[in-house]
Amino acid sequence: MEKISAEELNDKMVMDSEGSEIGVVHNIVVDAGTGMLTELVVKPATELDTSGFKKEDNYIFIPFEAVKAIRDVIVVDSEKIREHAQ
């Protein structure tokens, strides 16, 4: 697996697997015990309905397990996001 620094993820656009813009990465949550990435903290796009997301202040949280690809943008699995919201 290709390595990428957490710093490179900041300010990266997040889109779902259906091609909809979700927002921009603001921060990353890490499990201190395991060192595993657990969530992306995302500043949501203004047109995004955030009702199905875990929220805090002006940010939404996306489980890291939903990340499908990291390239010019971060692509997340729409189904995993919906499952996490339930």
Image (cartoon, rainbow, N blue to C red):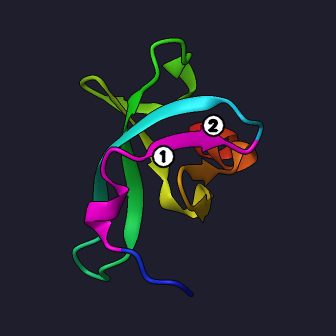
Please name the residue shown 25% across and 80% down the image.
Answer: 33
* Sooner in the amino-acid sequence: mark 2 or mark 1: 1
Q: Name the residue under label 2.
A: 86
Please name the residue shown 46% across and 22% down the image.
Answer: 45
Quarter-of-image position of residue 66 = bottom right
Which quadrant is home to the N terminus?
A: bottom right
Which residue reaches farthest bottom? 1
Q: Position of residue 37 (x, y in %)?
A: 38, 68
Q: Is residue 57 left or right of residue 55?
A: left
Q: Nearer the viewer, residue 79 or 71?
A: 71
Identity of the amino acid at label 1? Ile
Please name the residue shown 30% across and 80% down the image.
Answer: 35
Residues packed near mark 2 inside 10 Å, few (<14), some (14 to 19) or many (20 plus): few
For mark 2, give the secondary structure. loop
Q: Position of residue 78 (x, y in %)?
A: 71, 42
User: Please, is residue 11 above or below residue 39 in the view?
Assistant: above
Quarter-of-image position of residue 52 = top right
Residues packed near mark 1 inside 10 Å, few (<14), some (14 to 19) or many (20 plus): many
The stretch of residues the image draws in magenta is 5-17
Q: Is residue 28 left or right of residue 60?
A: left
For mark 1, give the secondary structure. strand
Q: Mark 1 points at which residue?
A: 62
Identity of the amino acid at label 2? Gln
Q: Is residue 43 visible?
A: yes
Q: Position of residue 73 (x, y in %)?
A: 54, 50
Quarter-of-image position of residue 20 = top right
User: Please, is residue 45 above or below residue 54 in the view?
Assistant: above
Q: Does the magenta stretch include residue 53?
A: no
Q: Where is residue 62 in the image (x, y as percent from the top left)?
A: 48, 46
Which quadrant is home to the C terminus?
A: top right
